[in-house]
Image: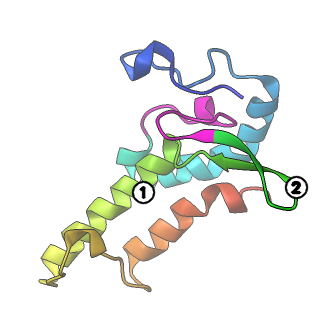
Amino acid sequence: MPHGRTNNGGPGDRGAWCDVPELQTTAWEKLAARYEAIGKKHSKIARGVAIEHLGTLGTGNHFIEVCLDEAQHVWFMLHSGSRGVGNRFGRYFIDIAKSEMRRWHIQLPDVDLAYLPEGTDHFEDYVEAVSWRRTSRR
């Protein structure tokens, strides 16, 4: 499983894959249409690499750990966080939520508690974006 970035994340970064394998290319075919639809509506999240992160581990605190419990069972723990696309989706909608709190004059004890009320367009778009990968297998 590849990890990290090409070109240290600088100009020309192609994600963790130097050349995307056929398995990821095939999987992306099921994801591409909805990703493009989300990107058309929210162009700020349609930039950067996407397929190039599919099936990769990531950077920073992302890891695979082999664990042994008290019953001597072996467990594999994986933390891959939000890779590229997921991170862009999350940051984008967090920024919208913070902006909406200011627009609605909602005072929160901490700006990181900002939210998108259910039933609003932004909430529906957020749910669509974060469920994109899970529901794209239809």
* Residue 105 left/right relative to 80: left
**Mark 2 residue type:** His
Question: In which quarter of the view is residue 20 placed?
Answer: top right
Residue sitting nearer the eye, 74 or 89: 74
Q: Residue at coordinates 82% horizontally, 31% vertically from top-left? A: 23
In the image, which disc is placed on residue 73? 2
Q: Is residue 114 magenta?
A: no
Q: Main secondary structure of the magenta part?
A: loop
In this figure, what is the number of numbered marks? 2
Indicate the amino acid at tag 1: Gly
Q: Tell me: residue 138, above or below residue 56.
A: below
Q: Nearer the viewer, residue 65 or 108?
A: 65
In this figure, which residue is indicated by the disc labeled 1? Answer: 90
Magenta stretch: residue 57 in it? yes
As drawn, 135 above or below 25? below
Mark closest to the chain's N terminus, 1 or 2: 2
In the rendered structure, the answer to whether residue 67 lies left or right of residue 86 reads right
Asked where in the image residue 130 lies, by quadrant, the reply is bottom right
Tag 2 secondary structure: loop
The magenta-colored residue range is 47-63
